[in-house]
Image (cartoon, rainbow, N blue to C red):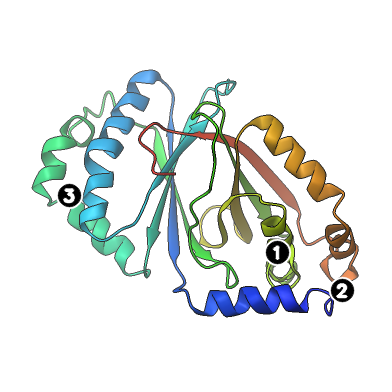
């Protein structure tokens, strides 16, 4: 198996060496009603994203649950890339001193404690995989409503088992399989800080739910995948898999 995957992994490694590894913030807003969602949307679209661009931050993705989401607590996901960890506190602290943010984000920033714009914010700090270090722009043709962004979180039963799953994606060749089958990835990353460690996260994207199902059927029947998942060294490396189906907000840059 390892000899069989040597050339694609070598090519991916050479490509990855030419890229600077990024850190990502996955900011999850939890809220309950449409008024809160509107406040968050207005702040992100009119204040936060333009401010981030003035600081050299690249494209930012904003996603929420698909139309059939019936949960009481709603979640909105903001994916922000950084060049290094120091940028995260520096840029976010400076934001509250920015005049344009204060003006355009006033409804959100000055909201009454009796009517807050969200219930809480949960943060994950992610580090791009060594063989896929940066965010990637998917090539999709579906409508905004039809497009599916699939966010997966794989928790490991122990740190050692978790690192074997990370290895499975990298040197094992799982990333190469996703690439060959055109899963339109947005990122593959290690969670270096967050409420569900040890775990990794990745996001793939599709033109529609049918397109998503067809891709996963091809993955499940792929000869290389079946050989890889049968390797004893990767057995039971995932203890919990959380899969979310998201859609992009109208102002999302993904």
Q: Is residue 45 left or right of residue 156?
A: left
Mark 1 burial class by Cα count in 10 Å: few <14, some 14-19, many 20+: many
Mark 2 burial class by Cα count in 10 Å: few <14, some 14-19, many 20+: few
Q: CA distance from mark 2 to mark 3?
A: 52 Å
Element type where label 2 sits in the image: loop
- 233 lies above or below 217: below
Residue at 26 percent of width and 53 percent of height: 52
- Residue matched to label 1: 176
Residue 231: image quadrant is: bottom right
- Residue matched to label 2: 1
Element type where label 3 sits in the image: loop
Quadrant for the N terminus in the image: bottom right
Residue at 22 percent of width and 41 percent of height: 47
Q: CA distance from mark 1 to mark 2?
A: 13 Å
Element type where label 1 sits in the image: helix
Residue 117 shows in this picture: no
User: Sequence-wise, which precedes: disc 3 or disc 1?
Assistant: 3
The residue lying furthest to the left in this view is 99
Mark 3 burial class by Cα count in 10 Å: few <14, some 14-19, many 20+: few
Q: Which-is-in-front pick, marks 2 and 3?
A: 2
């Amino acid at each position: 198996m390892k000899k069989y995957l040597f050339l694609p992994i070598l090519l991916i490694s050479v490509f990855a060496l030419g890229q600077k590894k990024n850190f990502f913030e996955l900011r999850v807003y939890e809220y309950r009603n449409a008024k809160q969602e509107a406040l968050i949307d207005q702040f992100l679209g009119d204040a936060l994203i333009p401010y981030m661009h003035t600081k050299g931050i690249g494209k930012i993705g904003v996603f929420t649950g698909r139309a059939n989401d019936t949960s009481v607590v709603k979640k909105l996901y903001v994916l922000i890339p950084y060049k290094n960890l120091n940028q995260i506190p520096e840029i976010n602290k400076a934001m509250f001193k920015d005049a344009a943010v204060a003006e355009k984000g006033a409804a959100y920033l000055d909201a009454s404690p009796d009517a807050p714009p969200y219930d809480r914010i949960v943060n994950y700090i992610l580090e791009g995989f060594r063989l896929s270090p940066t965010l990637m722009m998917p090539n999709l043709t579906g409508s905004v409503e039809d497009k599916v962004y699939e966010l997966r979180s794989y928790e490991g039963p122990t740190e050692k088992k978790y690192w074997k799953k990370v290895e499975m994606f990298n040197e094992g060749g799982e990333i190469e399989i996703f690439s060959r089958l055109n899963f339109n990835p947005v990122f593959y990353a290690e969670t270096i800080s967050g409420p569900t460690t040890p775990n990794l996260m990745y996001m793939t994207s599709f033109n529609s739910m049918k397109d998503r199902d067809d891709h996963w059927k091809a993955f499940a029947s792929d000869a290389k995948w079946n050989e890889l998942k049968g390797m004893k060294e990767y057995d039971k490396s995932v203890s919990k898999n959380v899969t979310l189906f998201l859609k992009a907000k109208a102002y999302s840059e993904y």
